[in-house]
Amino acid sequence: MSKPLLEVKNVKTSFFSHLGEIQAVRGSSFMLNQGDVLGIVGESGSGKSVTALSVMGLIDEPGRIKEGEILFDGEDLVKKSQSELSELRGNEISMIFQDPMTSLNPVYSIENQMVEVIRRHNKGMSKKLAVARAVEMLTLVGIPEPEKRIKSYPHEFSGGMRQRVMIATALSCGPRLLIADEPTTALDVTIQAQILDLMNDLKERVNASIILITHDLGVIAEICDHIIVMYGGIIMEKGTEKDIFYNPKNPYTVGLHQSIPKGDISGDKKRLVPIEGSPPDLMHPPKGCPFSPRCPHAMKVCLEKPAPMIRLNETHTSACWLLHEGAPVVGQYKKGGEILE
Amino acid sequence: MRNYFLRRFIYSLFTIFLIATVTFFMMHSIPGGPFTRERPVPPEIMRALNAKYHLDDPLIVQYFDYLKGLVTFDLGPSFSKIGVSVNKLIITGFPITAKVGLLAVILIIVLGVPFGIISALRQNRPIDYIVTFGATLGVTIPSFVMATLYIFFIAGKLGLVPTFGLKTPGSYIGPMIALSGYSLSFVARLTRSSMLEVLRQDYIRTARANGLKELAVIGKHAMKNALIPVVTYLGPTIAALMTGSFVVERIFAIPGIGRYFVESVTNRDYTVIIGVTVLYAAFYVFMVYLVDVLYAIIDPRIKFEKEAG
Amino acid sequence: MNVNASQFEFATKKESQDQEILRKSLTYWQDAWRRLKNHKLAMVGLIGVILILLFALAGPLFSRFSYSDQILDYSNVPPRMDIYEVADDYYVFITRDYKLLRISEKGEILARIFDSDKDAINKIYTYSDVDEGLDIALDFSYNLLPGKEADYDYTFAANGGPEISKPYKTVSNRTYPFGSDGVGRSILVRVMYGARISLTVAFVASIVNLLIGVVFGSIAAYEGGRTDIIMMRFVDILNSIPLIIYVILIMVLVGNRGLWTMIIALGSVYWVTMARLVRGQVLSLKEQEFVLAARALGVNRSHIISRHLIPNAIGPIIISMTMMIPSAVFTEAFISFIGLGVSAPMASWGTLANDALSGLMSYPYQLFSPSLAIAITMLSFNFLGDGLRDALDPRLRKG
Ligand SMILES: Nc1ncnc2c1ncn2[C@@H]1O[C@H](COP(=O)(O)OP(=O)(O)O)[C@@H](O)[C@H]1O
Ligand code: SF4
Ligand SMILES: [Mg+2]
């Protein structure tokens, strides 16, 4: 097996506000192989965006990556300077954001913004070629009449169209990794489905690995090869799509499942059971498992010590005390597995 | 787009017309005529004066005469400076005022905007504190205090420049500082806060995520957006500065239009009051119009929304 | 990993939830106050505002002068005086207009000593204190007449005794802590009363602005449609007019230069911003109510109003008020300074500054006090306003 495209090792990122340290990501490790699609799910505030921005090197003041390594193609991004990173961004690694309405600069035309990015990473390319490339990308993401529409300003596009423009720009320099941070959250349900279809389609056609971030498990079914479940700044469970959807081994993942409406879109809303309580205050995170204040199976040990990462099989790991030898038997949480630490 | 500019232009003309009308009737509703003085004027002289200046015509006739005068740029004679026309006063006073005002405007733009930007880019660093502190002082000290402090120390105690008048190049410094102090500080603060606001925007993160160089992120993407509110503020401010400040002209004894205005107010010289008010207002309205035009050029969203609405 | 078996007992609900640090759910105002308290400059501003109000309201009670008490003999006395000991325990101070004053060692003005002879050619004036039997000669020819270069400007000599060229010491003026003006009124007291005028004008004018703005803005927003368009067009027109001129014209029009004229002039002109703000808020409230009705089932209605609606509307209005007050102080000072303000014997800070202008070179302290008062007021309100903006801004609440 070739070496992974991206390897995140024990990354910790904090924001040092004047009220104290907000530990947004508290030791996150995962990897992504060439051509794979990785999903990251978790309620809002779990540290998904901060994880992604850490990879991009876009953590703003007063934030800082405290420790850990982010190996992209074997090189540690944490050690790179901003100007070195800017050569990679938009070129090797691209990112699109949650709110397409505000993510494009309102005072420049689409053409201006796309051409700027393309020529930034293709030194010496003529403007004409760059425009042609931009038009090609717009066609790829399904913008009708791209030659004409490229002259428009962002406000002349709908939200869904703007997100397509964002995707087109992000892919315009042929990146090897695309990070999509909640690309559909701000959109209407029907548009959401279209954008997801587009992502699914692009997955086959472009040669990029994708990290797809969402707070909605429903969104990432069928697109992702692997899924990470994050909560309170740590990774709770990690596995293939099948592991996470059909064989979840963490109470938090199960909670997430219960909180999404099952069945079709018109399905009965009453089955939606939100997880009681609210995410932890990351300035004063719980000593033990971050989910323990809300977990229906919390044990005394959960309040005291962080749960160990337990490997269930080749692909599937979960951080939960229930999987520990000594724990009482509860429902589907079959014990056993190798304790990693 | 052209439609929009045309419509704004017609609004501006209409506004000037309204101002002229309101000012006219305001001045004519003041009890007592312009020749009412503490010492009573003999009735026959009063009558002669009123006839000479057509003050005995019905108000509505006076009003149309006045509008006709406005259209032909004839603002009538001054009542207190006998033999001097309002046009003459404006022609002598305005260039002086405008010259000092223009210098102040230049000072504001070349200092205020860069200071604001530097301060925003170095938020919470020493340079930011210095700029913010200076700018806060600048908006809290009235221009007359600044002017008098300047005269007292620089002109008086140190004797570096003359205390009043505009005879030497150095004597422009005081009026420039006093005139621009507030707006300079305000522009610096506005630019800073606007820049900070823009730097938090999602599209700036997008620009960075697309790998643009920091220079392009700031100089291109942030700058244009950040300057929109600054331009909006600058328009009327330029108008206000170019038409002078009553205070600064009074303190530095500058024979500009602002001084004539204050004099005319104390002398109840109605034609001058009306004439200068309309001139001020017209200039101001014109600058506001210019800002609207500029605004539409900078920000493509404007045409769209206003055209639709 | 060794874990004691007893630790695998289930935790009770209480145990689980107790570890959540008591994150008290603060009401909007508690939260805002907490943020304001943490904002150092805002607290400086708040204390400044309180002190200024105390100064204006309570200050005059502790003073033996009223704002119009004149002692012509004690005119133009500065706050700091170089006193000379011309006889045993007999101290004098000479003003810049050559009035000789007897001063106590502590700095109280005891009496004026009148001149008995003025030799303007040789620049020697003689002052006589009959009660004490003292003739004091003031020789101020130094540095004025040729051949009399010295490092002092004048000397005293009592009853033909030796010339005293060195001040005994510099004392603070106990009688007039901020000095006295050209007709012998206490500047401190004048500035205190000036504060009442300036602040009354500013507060009342701002409230008038607020009322007009709220009424105008909410009618426009509620009526909507054509009414809204016409009203807002009117606001647009007002906004493209140099308003200061209209304030001046109104002052001219009303004629009498009372407090109310000034309040009317300022209050009737500067409400445009407030009207826009209120209209915007009301419009968004209308929308929110609609959204809430559709969505928020089961959420306590009064909770929504107190937690979301009111804060959104009140915050910007309070901030705008805090900013309006100093700008009204400013405008009032400006108008008074060009001689169109509240008329004598009342005096606002602007009037005081204007009065001091003619004597600037000789008596700069007369300008200093009212100017400082204006600057401190402006600073305090500005700091407080900035802090309030941070504290009340709903967008920043999470942070
Ligand atoms: N710029 C910032 N300053 C301070 N705290 C931040 C900042 N960005 C994120 N955080 C905090 O980090 C935590 C994780 O945020 P985030 O990664 O955005 O969550 P999500 O999983 O919803 O994407 C949150 O508690 C948030 O308050
Ligand atoms: S470790 Fe304990 S609290 Fe955390 S998820 Fe597992 S059972 Fe629940
Ligand atoms: Mg997020």
Image: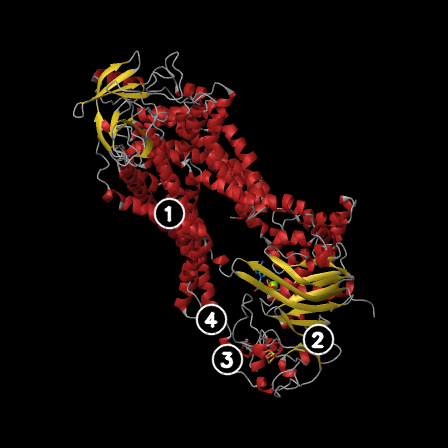
Chain designation of label 1 = C
Give a yes or no on whether discs 2 and 3 share a subunit: no
For mark 3, what is the residue? C15
Q: CA distance from mark 2 to mark 1?
A: 61 Å
Relative depth, front residue between A311 and B110:
A311
Q: Tell me residue B221's x, y (percent).
A: 63, 46
Badge 3 or badge 1: first in the primary sequence: 3
Dot 4: within a 10 Å radius of its alpha carbon, few (fewer than 14), some, or many (20 or more) residues?
Answer: few
Please determine if labels 2 and 4 lie on a single subunit.
no
Identify residue type, mark 3.
Answer: Glu
- Numbered tag placed on residue C48 in the rendering: 1
In the foreground, B214 or C155: C155
Q: Are marks 2 and 1 on the same chain?
A: no
Instruction: Please name the residue that numbered disc 4 is placed on.
Output: C22
Secondary structure at badge 3 equals: helix
Relative image position of residue A210 (x, y in whole percent): 72, 64
